[in-house]
Image (cartoon, helix red, strand yellow):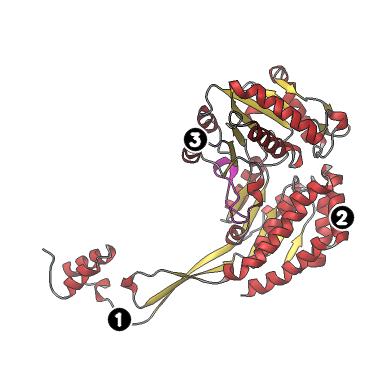
Amino acid sequence: MEELKAFHGGRANLRLCFNSNQNEDSIFKALDQDLGKSPVESYRDEVGVLKKSVTYTLSCLEKWVAPKKAEVPLLFFPAKAEVMPQPLGVVLIFSSWNFPFTLALDPLIGAISAGNTVLLKPSDLAPACMSFLVETIPKYLDNKAIKVVAGGADIGERLLQLKWDKIFFTGSPRVGRLVMAAAAKHLTPVTLELGGKCPAIVDTLSTTPSKAKVTAKRIVGGKWGPCNGQACIAIDYLLVEEKLASALIELLKKTIKRFYGENIKSLKSISRIVNEHQFQRLVNLLKDPNVADSIVYGGSVDEEKLVIEPTILLDPPLDSEIMSEEIFGPLLPIITLKNIEESINFINSKSNPLVIYAFTEDETFKKRILSETSSGTVTFNDSMVQFLCDSLPFGGVGQSGFGRYHGKYSFDTFSHEKSILHRGFYPEIEPRYPPWTDFKLLFIKLAYEFDYFGLILLLLGFKRS
């Protein structure tokens, strides 16, 4: 129970960290400085998420750390078995810049709850947030057990040369491969939280106007709401039937204007692009003439403020970069299909996404999506909210990553499940030992088939007819 005691202290101090008005204001200021996030978005996606995670972990931790009984076959009688979680040891966490507090501290909560010591390396692309973490965490957590290190890619490379008991990485597939290669030298287990092109299938516009409006709100909120599309679980592109495309675009336009403003000069409640490099990368996606011709809404940019307004594209070329690479920004392609069920083949033609969103009430279609596609998560009739559900594992599959966290899954990710078998000295089963005989072979066969009646007959000297 030492990890329970340790986490109780760390949890209490983490709560103090977030409940302090001064710290909350400092967090809001840092997020505004690095990403232009509003206080509401900052609380919804960062501070509130972490408070929830700490509270949930505390409420469940005593149950998590307790050894779990395991079933034992009758053949082992008398015996008992259990599985005991133990900390992995010294853990390295690399966090990302787009949610610089949530993606740093949510895995940290899991690592502490499992009883590990941790070195946290925040992203230097969010420098104000990184500085806050470096300066503030030592005030609340034991600096001998939990360390936060500032620095750029060079520091990350040096850290990867060391031996760790676990590495947890959130970021791009390109850097994820480097982390994997470095970890392989020490046979270090790794969790990779990556990304990919998360599709949203739209099949609800033909039902009722009210449901169509809700669909539009949830698409707009799920695309531009989280850090202006700079999120691994943001909707990357839409799939919709040709006959519904015009109606969908009009609904999206109205919703964007209501949520974020009429044009780039009046934009509100929306984050900016993190830096000039990412800004130029996104602008370059639109420089392809065929892609530019597909813009049906938005497209304006403000290089000085690093702002790109919400942009909708209709059927950009499928071989263009915008449709082959993760967008990670405020550009939303809409791909039209003759039949919405073609969306399954379309999704399967690309790498496994982190999330598939599907707006549909067709239960048969839902079952097909679940059984015929592969993704980290599937969310029906909403977007983004699955990230907030602590009882669900969060993580990718294939190119979108591997490993899980959130809630109990965070605890498991940073734990080793030690299997334990307790036996007495008697009775002794002699057929397990040489010299071998036909009787012993038959005994072993019946034992492995759990044929206890056959074993009784054998021991009594009878044979089955």
Q: CA distance from mark 3 to mark 2?
A: 47 Å
Asked if residue 244 lies left or right of residue 285, the reply is: left
Q: Name which residue type carries label 1.
A: Pro
Q: Residue 200: percent from the left, percent from the top?
A: 61, 34
The residue sitting at 21% across, 72% down in the picture is: 435
Residue at mark 2 = 26
Q: CA distance from mark 2 to mark 1?
A: 67 Å
Which tag is nearer the camera, tag 2 or tag 1? 2
**Disc number placed over residue 365 in the picture, else none:** 3
- Nearer the N terminus, badge 2 or badge 1? 2
Where residue 431 appears, as percent x and y from the top left, is 24, 73
Mark 3 crowd level (few <14, some 14–19, many ≥20, 10 Å Cα): some
Q: Position of residue 160 (x, y in %)?
A: 67, 53
Going 20% across and 66% down the picture, which residue do you hit? 442
Number of numbered discs on residues: 3
Q: Secondary structure at mark 3?
A: helix
> Above or below — where is 240 with respect to 443?
above
Coordinates of residue 263 in the picture (x, y in percent): 83, 28
Amino acid marked by disc 2: Ser
Mark 1 = which residue? 427
Count neighbours of disc 1 (C-alpha within 10 A) and say few if under 14, some if 14 to 19, many if 20 or more: few
Q: Which residues are magenta?
A: 389-405
Q: Earlier in the sequence, mark 3 or mark 1?
A: 3
Q: Nearer the viewer, residue 63 or 322?
A: 63
